[in-house]
Amino acid sequence: MNEEPRVIRLHAADDVVIAVNPIESGTWLESAGLRAINHIPAGHKLAVRAIEQGDPVRRYNQVIGFAAKPIAAGEHVHVQNLAMHDFARDYAFCADRKPASTNVPEVFFNGIVRSPGRVATRNYVGIISTVNCSATVSKKIAEILNHEVLPAYPNVDGAVALTHSTGCGMADEGEGITFLQRTLAGYARHVNFGGVLIIGLGCEVNQIGTLLHTQGLERGVKLATMTIQDSGGTVKAIQRGVALIKEMLPEVNQVVREPVSARHLMVALQCGGSDGYSGISANPALGAAVDLLVEAGGTAILSETPEIYGAEHLLTRRAISPEVGEKLVARIKWWESYTARNNAEMNNNPSPGNKLGGLSTILEKSLGAVAKGGTTNLIDVYEYAEPVTGHGLVFMDTPGHDPVAATGQVAGGANLICFTTGRGSVYGCKPAPSLKLATNTGLYQRMSDDMDVNCGEILDGTASLQEVGKRIFQLMLETASGRKSLSEEHGFGDEEFAPWMLGAVM
């Protein structure tokens, strides 16, 4: 608290600078050439010049909002004087597309080869509920397996029950059931599961037979199904479920890790509990790691459509084709319609915690959030929980709510998650390990049991953005090779499965 007050100016054309630490009213800021006329909390903004009411306000040399009233030089710029309204964005499809990298040395991690082209980073067994009514039975089966059965199978990372609050009281066709079945199928075929049991009640809308048929799933040695009603009730269903998994375990346990190309790594990119530093430290550092991953042939999945809103033009410029750019714009337009018919608006985000951390509008948050995607080409756009087949940077349409977004990414095939946070989110997403990246050193020290990487070193001046990016990429490889993340050490991931629920509840 006693260090010299500092500010960061991200671009010469910016109207604001960012306080690295708290700045008291009246403090002269030599690097900015002005005096603070309010108290400026750490991570918040102050104006470097007078701004007229209605004028755009820029950070990252991009519009983050419009002055709701006249703003004086040195004044705190935040929700009290910064507003958002619609403005034109130049999508400039493919304008910043780059040529493919050549002669890149191959990078490896120690993965679990399931079959040609399918490589796992973990080896779980999954118990998947088709409906909320089978949730308790699913959890009981996982509990028995973890405590009584799996200690005899050292190569199995655990049993995880994937339960949710829907599956019935919904239409048997349309977006709602399609999203749910696509998500459940994505987990059922996820490479990090060595074996899967799907459990229904028996009379729900989301019937097991329909799920298997529509999603192209087939029962086999490592995919079993059952219902509670056909099993004879709760006790018999639990016994049957444990027995079905036991039949799989000898084969599931027969795994070894071996060196495989990093092209088999598919990383979900997330940010939650963001602050004013997110777009300066953790997000661009993760972006630097993503550039290394893509260069090595791997895949990164950017998501959270409401949290790229207002910054989507930075991605369309990097699209490999106009068609890919148009797909992204189409998802933005869908969200504008979706929020409107639900009497909401896109600027409902940022959250209260985001605002306390210094983020004022969704435009500002989005501009920092897209930095997670690095600088490479955008090769494709996927709908929620669709199987991701491309190699490179892709986008998946998801809500901004972290558990729902990550659930879709993992259903799409992500076998690792990197999650940046400035406020201190705690999160895991079995069967995919989750790495937490802190935006600032204070958070990293305060929540050292949860944060895997301190990106605050960039703010402190003790490490460059590229150095931290290389460190994150190396940790990706080590984690994919079996090293446990801190969220795994705490057991996160059993309760975070959250499919996107659309449509009427009936």
Image: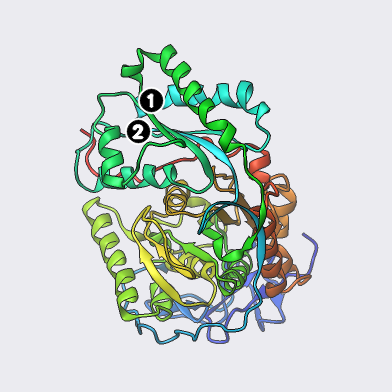
Q: What residue type is labelled 1?
A: Ser
Judge whether 360 appears above or below 96 on screen. above
Proximity of marks 1 and 2: CB atoms separated by less than 8 Å: yes
With 501 as the anchor, is 43 left or right in this view? Answer: right
Quadrant in the picture for the N terminus: bottom right
Judge whether 302 appears above or below 7 on screen. above
Q: Which amino acid does label 2 sit on?
A: Thr
Q: Position of residue 228 (x, y in %)?
A: 35, 20
Closer to us: 16 or 347? 347
Dot 1: few (<14), some (14–19), or many (≥20) neighbours within 10 Å? many
* Distance of label 1 from label 2 (alpha carbons): 7 Å
Closer to us: 86 or 178? 178
For label 1, the SS is: helix
Q: Position of residue 284 (x, y in %)?
A: 59, 70
Q: Position of residue 336 (x, y in %)?
A: 27, 62
At x 72%, y 55%, the residue is 442
Judge whether 121 appears above or below 321 on screen. above
With 227 as the anchor, is 435 left or right in this view? Answer: right
Mark carried by residue 262:
none
The image's colour scheme reads rainbow
For label 2, the SS is: loop
Residue that label 1 marks = 134
Residue that label 2 marks = 130
Dot 2: few (<14), some (14–19), or many (≥20) neighbours within 10 Å? many
Quadrant in the picture for the C terminus: top left
Closer to us: 22 or 351? 351
Q: Position of residue 96 (x, y in %)?
A: 45, 85
